[in-house]
């Protein structure tokens, strides 16, 4: 790993040549994938699930009623859920955009993409990292799967269906 000179983001550098024959993808296939991802992102931005659209769905606390404490609690809960939905929508859009950029990187290599795109990718990475929260101790498994034996699993599927 090394830091990109433009963004400071950690990158693996140039993909090794000749070792990923099973991963070889035609440029046309990557182009089609990128178009599908871009279309999905455009549909998200035009839908009611867009973060900006969700932000306009505010309800005045008085609309929940007056004269009883539960109305204020309901208004507070509504605002909390709405802000979480906005954050989810933004993060979801970022991840779709990352897929689009990733298809460009897969086709042309990281060094070949524009500096503005690299900065945008680094910004998405920072926003995503800011959303991460460590699980609370009571939510962590006492003995995570694969922790014995050097911290790696056995490579087996979790289910009978091979997934």
Image (spheres, rainbow, N blue to C red):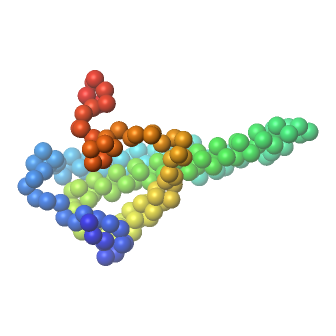
- Residue at the spot 51% in from the left edge and 52% down from the top edge: 133
Give the x, y percent position of residue 17: 10, 58
Q: Residue furthest left?
A: 18
Foreground residue, 138 or 83? 138
- Residue at the spot 13% in from the left edge and 50% down from the top edge: 20
Choose top left, top right, bottom left or bottom right for residue 112: bottom left
Foreground residue, 7 or 108? 7
Left or right of 16, for residue 122:
right
Residue 107 in sight from this viewpoint: yes
Q: Quadrant of the N terminus?
A: bottom left
Left or right of 145, for residue 94:
right
Asked if 71 appears above or below 20 in the picture, the reply is above
Choose top left, top right, bottom left or bottom right for residue 48: top right
Q: How many marks?
A: 0
- Residue at the spot 10% in from the left edge and 53% down from the top edge: 19
Q: Residue furthest right?
A: 67
- Residue at the spot 18% in from the left edge and 60% down from the top edge: 15
Left or right of 93, for residue 112:
left
Q: Quadrant of the C terminus?
A: top left
Residue 89 in sight from this viewpoint: no
Q: Residue furthest top?
A: 160
Foreground residue, 146 or 25? 146
Left or right of 139, for residue 98:
left
Give the x, y percent position of residue 66: 89, 40
Asked if 151 appears above or below 105 in the picture, the reply is above
Foreground residue, 150 or 54? 150
Give the x, y percent position of residue 114: 31, 69
Give the x, y percent position of residue 76: 74, 45
């Amino acid at each position: 790993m090394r830091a990109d000179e433009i963004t400071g983001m950690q990158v693996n550098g140039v993909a090794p040549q000749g070792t990923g024959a099973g991963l070889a993808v035609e440029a046309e296939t990557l182009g089609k994938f990128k178009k599908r991802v871009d279309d999905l992102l455009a549909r998200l931005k035009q839908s009611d699930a867009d973060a900006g659209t969700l932000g306009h769905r505010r309800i005045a606390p008085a609309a929940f009623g007056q004269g009883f404490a539960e109305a204020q609690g309901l208004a507070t809960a509504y605002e909390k859920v709405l802000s979480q939905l906005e954050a989810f929508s933004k993060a979801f859009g970022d991840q779709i955009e990352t897929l689009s950029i990733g298809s460009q990187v897969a086709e042309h290599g990281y060094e070949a993409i524009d500096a503005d795109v690299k900065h945008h990718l680094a910004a998405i990475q920072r926003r995503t990292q800011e959303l991460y929260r460590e699980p609370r101790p009571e939510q962590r498994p006492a003995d995570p799967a694969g922790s014995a034996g050097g911290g790696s699993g056995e490579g087996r599927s979790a289910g009978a269906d091979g997934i």
